[in-house]
Image (cartoon, helix red, strand yellow):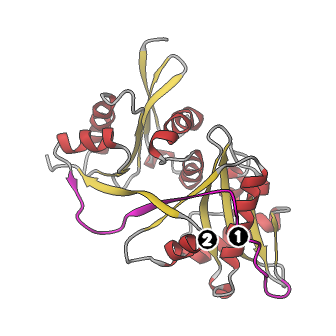
Amino acid sequence: MGAMRRREHAGPVALRAMQDLAVRSFPATGYRHIGDLTWNWCLALDRAGECPTAIWTEGDTTLAWGWLDVSGELMLQVDPDRPELADEVLDWAERTAGGPLSTEVAETEQHLVAALERRGYTRAADGPFMMCLRRPLVDLPEAPHLPDGYTIRAQRGHADVAGRAAAHRAAFGSPRVTAGRHARMRDAWPYRPEMDLVVVSPAGEVAAYCQGWYDEVNRVGEFEPVGTHPRHRRLGLGRAACIAVLHAFAAGGGERAVVYARGDDGYPVPLRLYTSMGFGAYTRTRTYTAPKP
């Protein structure tokens, strides 16, 4: 073991070091799947100045990290066996943010909850939160029948990549997923094309998709993201894509799948979709806001 070191970066450039901790911590917390980090890295591409990070290591082992967004939102992860580092991450974030700071943690991350409450952070009483859901990869639903002319498959080339990005923008009303960003994400670990499936319409348009990420150490697959183009909704396409990815996880040796869905009443449809496929809740997130100086 070496001495403790903290490295600061203008953006999430040390992604693999952060994922090292995510893999080790997932059995204890069920939160921050390695796919989450790659997906958020994709969204941060070309915005390095807006998302500083800091990583605490000992030798080659990552023990904690913090990731700030320009809005003052903090993502953080701390090894449950080193809870004292939560204060170091929060010290760094409060100093770096220079303004209002909030963070979302899972109830299973009790070492982070304890640090936040000890420092006077306020827990939101209501508002949006994420429900963390899981299901075993056994007794999977059979692939549903698709409307005539629709097919499910992996992406085959630039047209599919661009179509997948366009479908995401249409589904979520967000401009951040461009064809270029999606293409770069497909080159990032742990991306596997057979677990990132699209539903293609009779006209060749990407109508829906389910992107799966697989943690082969913990044998856990995750959906992130799932979407359907507004022109193709209410046809069961998103459900069909998710079931196909569940089967891909199982074929890859997976034992269970997870997904995070809004648990509040503001966006209830995804939660209903996942529970209908056999997912059940195991924890939820809480949002904390730093005290005013």
Residue positioned 51% across, 34% down in the render: 21
Q: Disc 2 marks which residue?
A: 277
Q: Main secondary structure of the magenta part?
A: loop
Q: Earlier in the sequence, mark 2 or mark 1?
A: 1
> Going by the picture, which residue comes out furthest to the front?
139
The local secondary structure at tag 2 comes to loop
Label of residue 29 in the image? none
From the viewer's perspective, tell me whether residue 20 is left or right of residue 112.
right
Please say whether residue 13 is visible from this viewpoint. no
Q: Could you tell me how far apart the alpha carbons at marks 2 and 1 are, in whole angstroms? A: 7 Å
Image x and y of residue 40, in percent = 54, 52
Q: Name the residue nearer the viewer: 183 or 110.
A: 110
Contact (Cβ within 8 Å) of mark 2 with mark 1? yes
Q: Name the residue nearer the viewer: 94 or 248.
A: 248
Q: Which residues are magenta?
A: 122-149
Label of residue 141 in the image? 1
Q: What's the amino acid at mark 1?
A: Pro
